[in-house]
C-alpha cells in the first residue's frame, strides 16, 4: 500500500509539472504569439538563424516537442521550407536542455519556497486582468506550478541513502532490491548503455514529453538510484524518443512535412550514434567540466553534483551535435528527400491538416497555416476568373478541358473551405487571446466570401458554356460591356488578393468601394441596355443570358468588397459595424 501511495505521489507531482508547463507555454503564446510567428517567418532563411530561432522558441514554450510539431505544421502549410525546418529542429534540441538545468537547481535551493509566491503574484493578473495582462498571469501561474511540480517530484522520490540507512527492514530490503536490479543491468558494458538508451526511449514515449522524462531521470539520479553514466544513456534515449511526437504529427501531412519529421529523427539518431562511439571519453570530458563548477554548486564533499553534470552533458551533447551537423544540412535534406519520395496525389492541392501534439496546445501559433490556406483561396479565385475571361473571349476554340479544369478548381475551393473552417474551429477550441479569437472569426467569414466568389465564377463559366452550346450570339456592344465589367472585377480581385492577411489602408478600402460602386453602375446600365435590345431584335434568351452574367459579375464585386471590409476591420477594430450596433 505504501508503494502504491508513493507511485501516486510521483505521478501527481509529474502531473503538476506537466500542467504547469502547459499553462505557462500557452500563456506565453498568447502574450508573444504574433512576435513568435514573425520570428519564425523572418529568422529562418539561413541555417544559423534558423537554429537560433528553434532555440529561442523552445526556451519560450518549454517543449521541444511543441516546437518540432509547430515546425512540421509550418512546413505542411508551406510557411517554412524543408531546409529552414532542419535548422529550427537543431536549435529546438538545444533549447530543451534548459529543463535539465532547472531541475538540477532543485538540490541547491528550495523551489517550493519561490513557486507559491510566483503563483501568488500571477493570480491577481489572471482574475483581474484582460488580454495580455491575464495571459501574463497565466505565465506566472504556470511557471510556479512547474517549479512546484519539480520540487514535489524530488520530495516524492525517496533518497536511496536514507532508505538503505532505515531501521525498517522492509524499506531497506526494497531499496536493496531496486539497487541490485539496476546494478545487474549496468554490468553488461556496451550492452548496458543500449539498455538504458532503450529505457530513455520508452520513458519518453510513455510520458509523451522529453521534459517530463528528463525531470524523472534527473530526479532519480539526484536521489542516488542511478549513476551518471546510466542516466546519461537514458538522456540520449530521450533525445530519440522525442522525435516520435513529430513523426506521429506528420502522418497524413504533405511530403515535405513528413520529410521534416524524418530530418528530426535522423539528426538525433546520428548524434546518439557518434556519441555512443566516444561515450567513455565524452563522459570524462563532462566530469572535467563539472569539476570546474564553482563551490556554490557543489555538495559538502566537493564532488560535482550529478544533477548539474547531467544538465552539462545534455547541453554539451546537443551543442556539439549542432556544430558537427549544421554544415551538413543540405546533405540531410537530400537524404530525407530520397527517404520520403514524392507520391502521386489524387487531389490538385495538399489538404490543410490541423497538426498538434498532446501536451501543449498550439492554437495561437497555428493561425499562420490557416492564413496561408486563405491566401490560396484568393489565388483560386484569380485563376478561376482568368479562366472564365479566356473562355468568354474565345468562342471559336474548344476549351472543354479548361472548363473541366475550372470545375476541378471549384471543387478544390469547396474542399479548402471545409478544411480551413474545420481548422479554425479547432484553433478556436483552444483558449485564444481576444485579438486572435476575433481574427479567427473574421477569417471564417472571409473564407465564406471567397467560396461564394468561386461559386459565382463557376456559374459564369456554365453560362458562357450554355451561350456557346445554344449558339446565343451577343452583339459587339454586349460583348464589350461584359468585358468592361470583367476588367473592373479583375482589378478588385487583384486588390483583395494583395491584402489578404495584411493590414488594409483606408485608401485600399476606398478603392474597393469605388470599384464595387462601378460594377453596380455597370450592372444597372448594361442590363437596361439588354432590356432595350430585347424589345427590338435580340432574342429574349440571349438578352436574359447577358443579364445573368452581369448579375453574377456584380455579385462577385459584392463579395470582394466584403472581403476587403473584413480585412480592413482586422486592424481598424473600432470602425467595425458590430462595434456600433450595426449589422456585422
Image (cartoon, grey):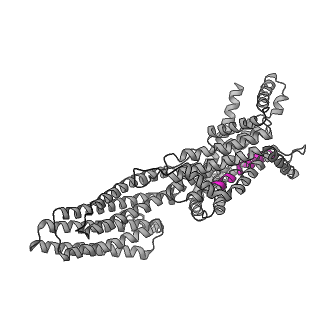
The residue shown at (25%, 63%) is: 398
Near-viewer residue (261 or 101): 261
Q: Most extreme residue toward the top, as rendered?
A: 169
Provide the residue span drawn in magenta: 88-114
Residue situated in front as seen by the camera: 573 or 58: 58
* Residue 456 among those drawn in magenta: no
In the rendered view, tell whether residue 1 sits above or below residue 455. Answer: above
Residue at 69% over, 51% down = 118
Tell me where residue 233 appears, x and y as whole percent.
Answer: 74, 41
The residue depicted at 76 percent of the width and 42 percent of the height is 232
Dominant SS in magenta: helix
Magenta residue check for 103: yes
Task: Judge by depth and name the residue closer to the eye, 421 or 123.
Answer: 421
Q: Left or right: where does residue 153 sit relative to residue 80?
A: right
Of residue 131 and residue 50, the one placed in the foreground of this image is: 50
Residue visible at 64% across and 57% down? 329
Report how many numbered discs are placed on residues in the image. 0
User: Which image quarter: residue 523?
Assistant: bottom left
User: Going by the image, does 535 lie left or right of 331?
Assistant: left
- Place of residue 469 in the rendered image (x, y in percent of width and height, measured from the top left): 18, 61
Amino acid at each position: 500500500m505504501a508503494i502504491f501511495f508513493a507511485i501516486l505521489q510521483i505521478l501527481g507531482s509529474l502531473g503538476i509539472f506537466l500542467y504547469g508547463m502547459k499553462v505557462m507555454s500557452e500563456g506565453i503564446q498568447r502574450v508573444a504569439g504574433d512576435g513568435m510567428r514573425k520570428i519564425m517567418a523572418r529568422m529562418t532563411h539561413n541555417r544559423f538563424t534558423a537554429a537560433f530561432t528553434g532555440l529561442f522558441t523552445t526556451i519560450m514554450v518549454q517543449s521541444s516537442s511543441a516546437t518540432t510539431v509547430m515546425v512540421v505544421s509550418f512546413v505542411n502549410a508551406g510557411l517554412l521550407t524543408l531546409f529552414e525546418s532542419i535548422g529550427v529542429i537543431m536549435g529546438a534540441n538545444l533549447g530543451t536542455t534548459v529543463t535539465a538545468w532547472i531541475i538540477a537547481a532543485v538540490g541547491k535551493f528550495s523551489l517550493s519556497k519561490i513557486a507559491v509566491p510566483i503563483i501568488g503574484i500571477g493570480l491577481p493578473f489572471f482574475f483581474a486582468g484582460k488580454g495580455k495582462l491575464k495571459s501574463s498571469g497565466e505565465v506566472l501561474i504556470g511557471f510556479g506550478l512547474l517549479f512546484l511540480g519539480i520540487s514535489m517530484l524530488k520530495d516524492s522520490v525517496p533518497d536511496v541513502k536514507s532508505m538503505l540507512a532505515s531501521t525498517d527492514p522492509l524499506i531497506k530490503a526494497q531499496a536493496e532490491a531496486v539497487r541490485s536490479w539496476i546494478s545487474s543491468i549496468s554490468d553488461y558494458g556496451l550492452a548496458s548503455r543500449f539498455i538504458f538508451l532503450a529505457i530513455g526511449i520508452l520513458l519518453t514515449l510513455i510520458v509523451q514529453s522529453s521534459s517530463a522524462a528528463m525531470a524523472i531521470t534527473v530526479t532519480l539520479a539526484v536521489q542516488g538510484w542511478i549513476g551518471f553514466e546510466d542516466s546519461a544513456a537514458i538522456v540520449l534515449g530521450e533525445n530519440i524518443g522525442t522525435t516520435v511526437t513529430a513523426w506521429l504529427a506528420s502522418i497524413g501531412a504533405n511530403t515535405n512535412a513528413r520529410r521534416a519529421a524524418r530530418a528530426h529523427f535522423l539528426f538525433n539518431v546520428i548524434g546518439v550514434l557518434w556519441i555512443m562511439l566516444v561515450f567513455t571519453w565524452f563522459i570524462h570530458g563532462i566530469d572535467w567540466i563539472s569539476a570546474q563548477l564553482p563551490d556554490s554548486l557543489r555538495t559538502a564533499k566537493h564532488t560535482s553534483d550529478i544533477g548539474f553534470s547531467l544538465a552539462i552533458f545534455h547541453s554539451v551533447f546537443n551543442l556539439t551535435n549542432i556544430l558537427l551537423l549544421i554544415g551538413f544540412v543540405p546533405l540531410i535534406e537530400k537524404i530525407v528527400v530520397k527517404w520520403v519520395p514524392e507520391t502521386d496525389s489524387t487531389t490538385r492541392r495538399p489538404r490543410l491538416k490541423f497538426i498538434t501534439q498532446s501536451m501543449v496546445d498550439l492554437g495561437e501559433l497555428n493561425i499562420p497555416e490557416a492564413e496561408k490556406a486563405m491566401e490560396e483561396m484568393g489565388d483560386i479565385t484569380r485563376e478561376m476568373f482568368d479562366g472564365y475571361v479566356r473562355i468568354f473571349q474565345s468562342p471559336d476554340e474548344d476549351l472543354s478541358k479548361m472548363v473541366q479544369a475550372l470545375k476541378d478548381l471549384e471543387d478544390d475551393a469547396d474542399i479548402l473551405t471545409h478544411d480551413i473552417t474545420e481548422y479554425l474551429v479547432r484553433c478556436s477550441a483552444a483558449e485564444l487571446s481576444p485579438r486572435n479569437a476575433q481574427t479567427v472569426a473574421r477569417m471564417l467569414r472571409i473564407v465564406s466570401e471567397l467560396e461564394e466568389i468561386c461559386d459565382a465564377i463557376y456559374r459564369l463559366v456554365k453560362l458562357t458554356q450554355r451561350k456557346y452550346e445554344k449558339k446565343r450570339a451577343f452583339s459587339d456592344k454586349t460583348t464589350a460591356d461584359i468585358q468592361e465589367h470583367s476588367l473592373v472585377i479583375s482589378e478588385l480581385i487583384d486588390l483583395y488578393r494583395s491584402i489578404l492577411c495584411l493590414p488594409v489602408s483606408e485608401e485600399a478600402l476606398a478603392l474597393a468601394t469605388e470599384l464595387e460602386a462601378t460594377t453596380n453602375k455597370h450592372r444597372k446600365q448594361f442590363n437596361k441596355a439588354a432590356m432595350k435590345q430585347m424589345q427590338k431584335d435580340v432574342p429574349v434568351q440571349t438578352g436574359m443570358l447577358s443579364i445573368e452574367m452581369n448579375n453574377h459579375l456584380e455579385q462577385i464585386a459584392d463579395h470582394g468588397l466584403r472581403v476587403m471590409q473584413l480585412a480592413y476591420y482586422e486592424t481598424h477594430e473600432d470602425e467595425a459595424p458590430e462595434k456600433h450596433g450595426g449589422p456585422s
